[in-house]
Image: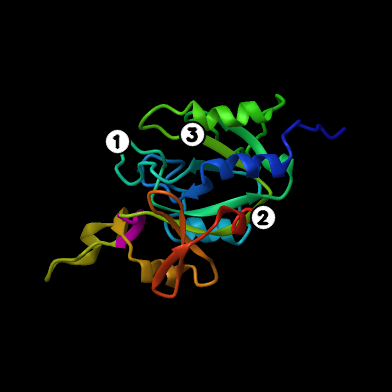
Amino acid sequence: MTLVYQRPPVSDIYSLLRTGNSLIVHFSGIAPGTGNPSERLYYPHDLRNVVSGGAMGGVSCSVIGPGDTIGQLECDNATGCIGVVLGLQSPSSLLDVHVGDGGSSVQPDGNRRPNPQPLSLIDVQGTLTGRRLGTYNEWVIGDYKVLGIFVADPYMVRAIADIPVPPGVPATILGSPSVPGIRYETIPDIQRDFPDQRVFSFNLSGIRQLEGRQWIDAPHNTIYI
């Protein structure tokens, strides 16, 4: 028997997001201890995997809006600076929600288990209105729609970088030729990495979309339709 987990209609969830110009974003993580280091994908490959539909079993997301703190690590409302904006295919796309870090994890089959408890719209709203200062919430989204890429200054990611080899030193002495580390991207870098995606950001009051080299207003109802 297939279990059905009660969730609010997608239109109601989108209306809730619209009141705060909020976006559901799966970020490329910055923290070094995230996940299994031997299996972890790093930017941009982690986000490309999501964009290509390789994580339909569920990904962890932050729900953010204009005025949120992003890119300051110690008091962030998000877990990164660059991420994929996601939408819902159906109510069951919303696997779980938490007002803080829910600690969700990937199961051996590659999926994240849905919360078997019913979720009301009030439960979902509480993860937005009840979020404490300087913390991030967590929505677990599966069977998603890819709506674009979100970026926030300082465009910081954790990526694989080559180790500089000093002149005259054999590379074999250094062991692995590359290691994960912090890297700062530019807008052209991001457009190159995701050429087919809309690129979004925030100003103080709303959502912006990059058109060529200019930022223009992006009404919420043109993103979550």
According to the picture, the residue beneath numbered tag 1 turns out to be 74
Mark in front: 2 vs 3: 2
Question: Circle 1: is it few (<14), some (14-19), or many (20+) Cα within 10 Å?
Answer: few
Looking at this rendering, what residue extends furthest in the bottom direction? Answer: 212
Residue closer to the observer: 109 or 96? 96
| Quadrant housing the N terminus | top right
Mark 1 lies on a secondary structure that is: loop
Residue that appears at 67% across and 55% down? 225
Sequence-wise first label, 2 or 3: 3
Main SS category, magenta section:
strand
Q: Which residues are magenta?
A: 154-161
Q: Is residue 70 left or right of residue 62?
A: left
Which residue type does callout 2 highlight?
Ile
Q: Is residue 10 left or right of residue 190?
A: right
Residue that appears at 55% across and 33% down? 104
Residue 131 falls within the magenta-colored stretch: no
Tell me where residue 180 appears, x and y as whole percent. 33, 53
Total number of numbered discs in the rendering: 3
According to the picture, the residue beneath numbered tag 3 turns out to be 137
Which residue type does callout 3 highlight?
Asn
**From this viewpoint, is residue 108 visible?**
no
| Real-space CA distance between mark 2 and mark 3, rounded to the nearest whole angstrom | 23 Å
Residue closer to the observer: 71 or 33? 71
Sequence-wise first label, 1 or 3: 1
Tell me where residue 143 appears, x and y as whole percent. 69, 49
Q: Is residue 160 above or below residue 4?
A: below
Picture disc at residue 225:
2
Tell me where residue 205 appears, x and y as whole percent. 42, 49
Sequence-wise first label, 2 or 1: 1
Residue closer to the observer: 153 or 172? 153
